[in-house]
Amino acid sequence: MIFIIISIIIVFVVGTLVTVQVIVPALTEDSKPVPKEQEQLPTPEARTSTEPQPLTQHSSGPQLTIQKPISKLSNSDNLENQLLAEMQGDAPQAESQVLTEVQHSVEPKETVLSRLQLSLKNIYNMPSEYQAIADQYIKNMDQVYQDTFTLEDHPNMDKITSFGIALLHQYANDSKQTYLPIVEHLISKINEQLPQGNELVHLPTKWNQKYYFFCVRLTRMLAMFEILSTNESIKTICHQRIYQITPFLWKSLEWDHLMGIQNAWIAIPRLITNFLKETKTYEKETQPNHIGTLKQIMKVEFLKNIDAINLDGIWIEKSCIFNGVATYWPLVESGTFYASVFRALGFEADIDDVTQKILDKILHPSMDIIPLGLFGRQSDIRITKTLKTNWSNYQRKAGLDIGIFPVAGLGVFKSKDFAFWVRVQRWYIAGYEADQVDFELAGGWIQMRKLYLKSIEQSYESMTWQKIKMQPGVISNEDGSDDFEYMKPQKEEKANYPMDVISHVGTLMDEGRRVLYWKNEYKFKSLFGMSKITEFGVCTDNGLVVQMEVLNKTDKILKIRIKDDDAHGMEFDCRCSDSNQKCNNGFVTDGKNDSIVVNWRQVFKKEEDDHPQEVTRTTKGHMTFKFGGDDYVIESRDKLHFVIKNSQVLLAGSFEKSLSYIIEYGYKNRAIKFEFNPNTLMYKAII
């Protein structure tokens, strides 16, 4: 790697002169090879190619620019190692034996097949309702199929693949003979209607179903059947259909140049069928120039110090970006299947262990609640059933801690009394992603500030728009004319990005105080046109304290919810810049082209002097609050923000992707050096 050293003289507005040395990797001509066009050849052995290079999957969205480190590297390797050690140091050893590629290449196929079969065992629990369906299906296959598994006279791929995968895993667990004939019947029905041909590029329009069910779930089901069954005629169908849908390790139907976890979803079923049916192709496609990226996904190489933030993947600080959306859904949805079979083929994989560590960072140790939007587009706010099904061996080790995920803008606060999550907007990440079923939940993703209380956990239900607009922080039309049809995509998914974003999220643990704080300034045109929302918030063990300002640029009167009817036993206060509004009904209104500022709090102890009572703004627009007799100011400066306690700079926070730097910054005519803390992901002032 070649580096260019650049000295930059920076004069800050306050008059400080700071010299910063930047070390920038210089790309050579051969550092990013361009994939050659692949000739379509008829033989399976010829249908291989070198890996494609990363391509953005966003046809629209934010314009991305190269961002450079603030100052020179200092002990960066050591800090990165600490971050990696936190993620991987105590990862459990996989049950499946990992072999070297040399060992694997000389193993008998029967040995590897036996290991593949074992890799499917005890990693998935079949939902109880599927057993009842299976009992009926085996008695009257055609009728149950027609009644339960068709959609407009076509196979309902969502239901079929979910059911089929469950049956195959259960067969791996208990060898019950009725399961395989059912899956054979399902595969035969699908095969009857899928188009023929060597490569399937487009699905017939009349099917109108998501590619995910074909590219990912169907190929997984077919590969699992090949592993478990001895029915050669159906196994041949499985092999042919996987080849037709996934002609290359990185291409499936119209999905092309797939990277990140998507690459694993499509590549691993192809590897399995090739191992079982096409040995020469398998040997070619497992060469380093073909599966190098796949290995980096399965044996996780965290994204770090990378300029192009639109690269999807798992970041070193544990944010997960998928198709430009901050979400952990693809990791949770994958379960342990892909890692388990990849190890059985003889390769290293720890993505399942990494996922479990991330879950511990986000989940409350004893509550079955998840933040809306962070684990999928659906309205469900519970995760136990998903974990029981896809992660049957997961043992929750979550603590009552607080933390941040700077790249995603996520903050987490867990106490013995409640769980709270907040995600501030990032200009490079979609604020909301909708599909054809769930397209009314944007207010919940973006604005909801809800404390989920341990004492009433069982009363929480899945979210609908009618429930969301009654949650604190959510803005809606005063006349009830909210309409989300324009957010509904015609097919697949649709991402909606925020505009004019200024945001930060950070933690403060000072003298035993636990504080999660955030600033969230943005416009979200898809909902409120050019209206500007500015929010400052603080969460402590005593509850929430928030200030919101809404500049209404719509032609409607807006209303802002500032109370949570679920939070029994907590105290609520509201103070509004419009003295005529007393918040008695839990709402304040904002007229056309008006601006309103509202301060509200939801706390356990109303007169608790040891906790913040109010969040305010300085004349320069910085956030300020009092805690335990000390005055705190959070100052925003570009990508950094500073925590100032009683006029003394204490901490800095950043959403820079390069979290492993010593940074130096000019503040009030002096340079302050900050050292990164890999445990809090904040920078502590050291000089």
Image (cartoon, rainbow, N blue to C red):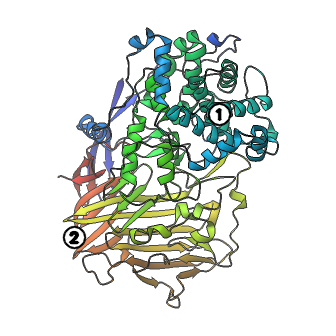
Task: Report the quarter where the N terminus lies.
Answer: top left
Q: How many residues crowd mark 1 within 10 Å: few (<14), some (14–19), many (20+)?
A: many
What residue occupies the far front of the structure in this picture?
Answer: 139
In this view of the protein, which residue sits in the foreground, 232 or 6? 232
Q: Provide the secondary structure element on which disc 2 rests.
A: loop
Occupied quadrant, residue 316 = top left
**Marker disc for residue 158:** none
Disc 1 marks which residue? 218
Occupied quadrant, residue 262 = top right
Do the CB atoms of the residues marked 1 and 2 lie less than 8 Å apart?
no
Residue name at image x 51 percent, y 41 percent: 310
**Marker disc for residue 646:** 2
Amino acid type indicated by mark 2: Asn
Relative image position of residue 397 (x, y in whole percent): 33, 50
Q: CA distance from mark 1 to mark 2?
A: 60 Å
Residue name at image x 55 percent, y 33 percent: 171
Q: Is residue 61 above or below residue 338?
A: below
Q: Is residue 493 left or right of residue 30?
A: right
The disc, 1 or 2, on the residue closer to the chain's N-terminal end is: 1
Residue name at image x 40 percent, y 78 percent: 601
Relative image position of residue 551 (x, y in whole percent): 56, 73
In this view of the protein, which residue sits in the foreground, 307 or 479? 479
Whether residue 186 is visible, yes or no, is yes
Relative image position of residue 358 (x, y in whole percent): 39, 46
Amino acid type indicated by mark 1: Leu
Residue name at image x 72 percent, y 46 percent: 491
